Image: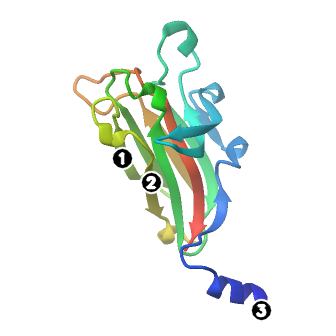
Amino acid sequence: MALVAWFVLRPAGEERVTADLIAQFDAASEKRPNPDVFSLVDATLGGETRKAILVRDPSASTDGSVGVAGSRLVYDVTVPEDGELRFSIGLLESEWTTDGDGVLFRVLVGATGPPEEFINVVLDPYHKPGDRGWLPLTVDLSEYSGETVKLFFNTNASPPARPPRDDRNGDAALWADLRIVAR
């Protein structure tokens, strides 16, 4: 009875986290192109520090590039009733003054069929000062309540272009506060 009362009377705006994907980083079912591309960091953007997964090219020390052409991090999660995926994206502050073409962040959800894209965002803090900071995002997962789904977190070194580009300059991508919450 006390648990029901807490749930009903909990302070407004408090979220109930059912899966902390940062804490479950080691349990990710897929890390492409290889696990060395990903690391857990405390990242500060615009004075705000968050636990994050940094995506960067492991060869950065030899060729000068810091980005990665493309990456994929996959989690298998069971979605709670009225579930949402909440997170923030950004690029390391140290890369904001590096000329490049930004990073494409994509989030897909796969259940029984092919994965469906829910987020497709390009951050380019060199050319767009408004991209200098954390961008909070939410994906409504309520249609998958009770199901186990695959969550795909993809980055690409360049936004789609003709001809295709692979500009890795300034591409140190961050996924922060990845969590599933029940509303």
Give above or below for 121 relative to 166.
below
| Cα distance between the residues tagged 1 and 2 | 13 Å
Q: Position of residue 74 (x, y in %)?
A: 58, 44
Q: Residue 136, which numbered label? A: 2
Quadrant including the N terminus: bottom right
Callout 3: SS:
loop
Task: Name the residue type under label 1.
Answer: Asn
- How crowded pointer 2 is (Cα within 10 Å; few <14, some 14-19, many 20+) is rated as few
Count of residue discs: 3
Q: Residues within 10 Å of mark 1 (few under 14, many from 20)?
A: few
Given the current orientation, which residue lies at the most extreme front position? 47
Helix, strand or loop for disc 1: strand
Q: Name the residue under label 1.
A: 120
Q: Vertically, is 130 above or below 157?
A: below
User: Of tags 1 and 2, which is closer to the observer?
Assistant: 2
Percent of width and height locating residue 27: 71, 45
Residue pointed to by mark 3: 1
Mark 3 to mark 1 CA distance (whole Å): 43 Å
Q: In this view, does 126 lie to the left or right of 52?
A: left
Q: Looking at this view, is 170 or 96 the one in front? A: 96
